[in-house]
Structures are given as structure tokens and as C-alpha cells.
Image (cartoon, rainbow, N blue to C red):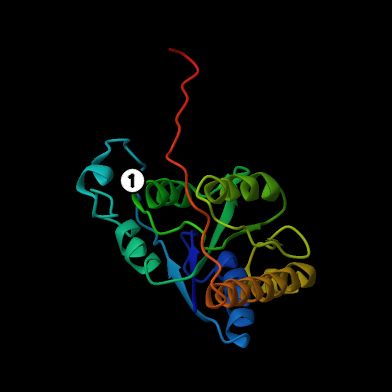
Amino acid sequence: MKVLLINGSPRAKGCTYTALYEVSRSLEKENIQTEIFHVGNKPIRGCMACGGCSKNDSGKCVFNDDTVNVALEKAKEVDAFVFGSPVHYASPSGLMTSFLDRFFYAGDGFQYKPGAAVVSCRRGGATAAFEQLNKYFTISNMPIVSSQYWNMVHGNTPEEVKQDLEGMQTMRTLGKNMAWLLKSIEAGRKAGIQLPEKEPRAATNFIR
């Protein structure tokens, strides 16, 4: 089993990475493979709602000049996800928002794979950013993994984040909980428990 942890900070080894690394260490101790993927620090296009990804039926975005399609390829081979972002103006980073809008719209390999969000902030805005990230899971049939507190760390540098003892413990607990859920899903699969049967999609417009 493997978990893909996506770092939505422009800084590859900053505060968000520090939190994600603590989650990955906890997962590795439970014999779950991990990979931390950095979205990069170059501009990432927002979704243009062109519909090209659904027309080409490739599970990729038509724009291929950033890291979105690279991550979508990796997503096909993993069993769960952790999405981490710094807090910018009480929201996930602009990079992460643009990345996830296209990642989820173009991709199709997320259903019934557990997901978790992690946010890092200096002081405030963490819960608002955390809520925004969780909405990607709740529209995608993904079980959400929780911890002993909301998945956030505080600090202005990686060293300060490490001093947030409760935050770091929350990250470790998140890793343990995700490992437990993944093992439970695997045990259920071996016992013959099938995924839920999906109904045909119903779409209701409020104005006709």
C-alpha cells in the first residue's frame, strides 16, 4: 500500500513539508509506503472549464506545462492521499487551489481512496483553509481521515513547527489513523466486501 502526500507550498522543504514528513514517518512505521510530491514553485494554470479532459478520456488535463499531469499519473498507483498547504489569506495557497481544481476535475482515480488535508500557518486562518481542502474529498466519494485535532501545525519556520508539539502529534496520529483505515479496507476487500454500487448520475439545475 502507498500514500501520495502532495506539498502545495512554493517552498519544497518549508513548514508544510515538515508537517507532511511527520505524517509520512508515521505511515512508514506502519509499513505503508509514502511519496511526498512537491507541486513546484512555478505558476500553475487554473481550470479553464474547457472540458478537454472529458473529451480525450485520458484522465489528464489538456494543459501539460506544469505538475498536474505528473501527479495524476502517480495518483493511479496509490491507495490514499494527503494534501498539504500553507495558509495564504485564510485559504490554501493559490498554487494548491489551481493544482487541485484541475487535479480533481481531470482525474478519475480518487473514488473510495482515503484522503486527508493538512494545513500550516503562522498564526490564523487555518480552519478556513482546512475546510476548503476537505471539500475536494466530499464531492469525490473519498473517505476522510481525521486525527485527534484538526490537521494543522503552527510556526513561521520548520524549526518553529517542530516546537508545536501538539501539531506534530496530530500529524503522527493522522498517519496512524490512515494506516489503520487502509489496512481495514484491504481486509474488507479480502473478505469479499464490494465497493458501493453507484447510481446513474442525477444533475439538477435550479433554474430552467
Inspect the image, locate mark 1, and give the three-letter code of the amino acid beneath it: Arg
- Residue furthest to the front: 192
Which residue is under mark 1?
Answer: 45
Q: Position of residue 204 (x, y in %)?
A: 47, 25
Q: Residue at x 52, y 48 (%)?
A: 136
Q: Residues within 10 Å of mark 1 (few under 14, many from 20)?
A: some
Q: Position of residue 119 (x, y in %)?
A: 62, 57
9 in relation to 169, above or below:
above
Q: Residue at x 78, y 73 (%)?
A: 165
Q: Secondary structure at mark 1?
A: loop
Q: Position of residue 21 (x, y in %)?
A: 58, 75
Relative horizontal placement of residue 192, taking residue 168 as reference (left or right): left
Q: Residue at x 41, y 61 (%)?
A: 39
Which corner quadrant of the image does residue 72 belong to?
A: bottom left
Q: Nearer the viewer, residue 177 or 8?
A: 177
Q: Residue at x 27, y 46 (%)?
A: 53
Q: Nearer the viewer, residue 11 or 139?
A: 139
69 in relation to 189, above or below:
above
- Residue furthest to the top: 208
> Exactly how many numbered labels are in the figure?
1
Which corner quadrant of the image does residue 191 belong to?
A: bottom right
Relative horizontal placement of residue 200, taking residue 154 as reference (left or right): left
Q: Position of residue 19 (x, y in %)?
A: 62, 69
Can residue 188 be seen by looking at this rendering?
Answer: yes
Figure quadrant of the C terminus: top left
Q: Nearer the viewer, residue 178 or 194?
A: 194
Can residue 88 be seen by looking at this rendering?
Answer: no
